[in-house]
């Protein structure tokens, strides 16, 4: 019986696509749902084209009532019975009420070397700090933003002349390598961190 993975997106879903493409053959998991808070998210069409069930739960109607939004998330998830949730470019903060029951079964990818640069503008902040290296992290999700146990990281050098855009492009390539590798190890029950260096 495969491990059922739901993937949350808010945008293009490039990480979602790499996760989906990795879950084939003898991989212990299969995607069961791609969910977005944004009906315009490009990743929804990409997932549907691959025959994966999709769902949209817009946050705007809940006017900041996070608990009501998260209850709607739970209702959208239930029919698909996921065992694991992967956040992949999902841009809504989740409260402990939603996250706690998924403790140890929810992952996120963040474009920095956590615990550095939680939150947004990670590439710009690394450049502003003059960091010699940067990268991405896959971690277990807890009620604290970008704070759970680290399951994988890729480090890469910051190059002379890098802009937030050029850095983001190089980091994204490594996200696409790291997240599938971590998920495969995670669903096999191995939480040993994967620590990689990018060229
Ligand atoms: C990526 O940079 C990821 O690190 C962040 O969201 C961005 C977009 O991801 N969480 P995707 O292309 O929608 O997967």
Image (cartoon, grey):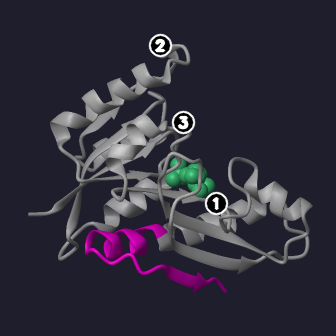
Q: Residue at x 8, y 63 (%)?
A: 1
- From the viewer's perspective, tell me whether residue 77 is left or right of residue 98: left
Nearest to the observer: residue 83 or residue 167: 83
In the picture shown, does residue 33 fall above or below 187? above
User: Residue 155 location, x and y as percent?
Assistant: 66, 78
Q: Which mark is residue 3?
A: none
The residue carrying mark 1 has its beta carbon less than 8 Å from ligand 1: yes
Distance between mark 1 and mark 3 Cα atoms: 16 Å
Foreground pick, 160 / 129: 129
Q: Which mark is residue 111?
A: 1
Of the pair 22 and 78, the residue shown nearer to us: 78
Is 183 situated above or below 78?
Answer: below
Which residue is disc 3 drawn over? 92
180 part of magenta stretch = yes
Query: Percent x, y for residue 120?
Result: 71, 47
Q: Is residue 101 above or below residue 70?
A: below
Task: Check the picture and name the quadrant holding the C terminus.
Answer: bottom right
- Which element type, helix, strand or loop, lies under badge 2? helix
Extent of the magenta region? 179-199
Q: CA distance from mark 3 to mark 2?
A: 14 Å
Tag 2 residue: 61
């Amino acid at each position: 019986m495969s491990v059922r993975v739901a993937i949350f997106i808010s945008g293009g879903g490039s990480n979602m696509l790499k996760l989906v493409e990795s879950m084939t053959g003898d991989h212990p998991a299969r995607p069961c749902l791609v969910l977005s808070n944004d009906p315009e998210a490009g990743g929804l069409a990409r997932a549907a084209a691959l025959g994966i069930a999709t769902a949209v739960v817009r946050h705007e109607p809940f006017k900041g009532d996070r608990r009501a939004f998260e209850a709607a998330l739970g209702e959208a998830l239930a029919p698909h019975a996921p065992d694991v949730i992967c956040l992949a470019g999902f841009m809504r903060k989740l409260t402990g009420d939603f996250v706690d029951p998924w403790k140890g079964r929810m992952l996120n990818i963040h474009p920095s070397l956590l615990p550095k640069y939680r939150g947004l503008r990670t590439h710009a902040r690394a450049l502003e700090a003059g960091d010699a290296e940067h990268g991405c992290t896959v971690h277990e999700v807890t009620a604290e933003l970008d704070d759970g146990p680290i399951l994988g990281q890729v480090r890469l050098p910051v190059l002379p002349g890098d802009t937030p855009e050029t850095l983001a492009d190089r980091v994204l390539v490594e996200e696409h390598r790291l997240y599938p590798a971590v998920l495969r190890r995670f669903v096999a029950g191995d939480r040993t961190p994967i620590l990689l260096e990018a060229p």
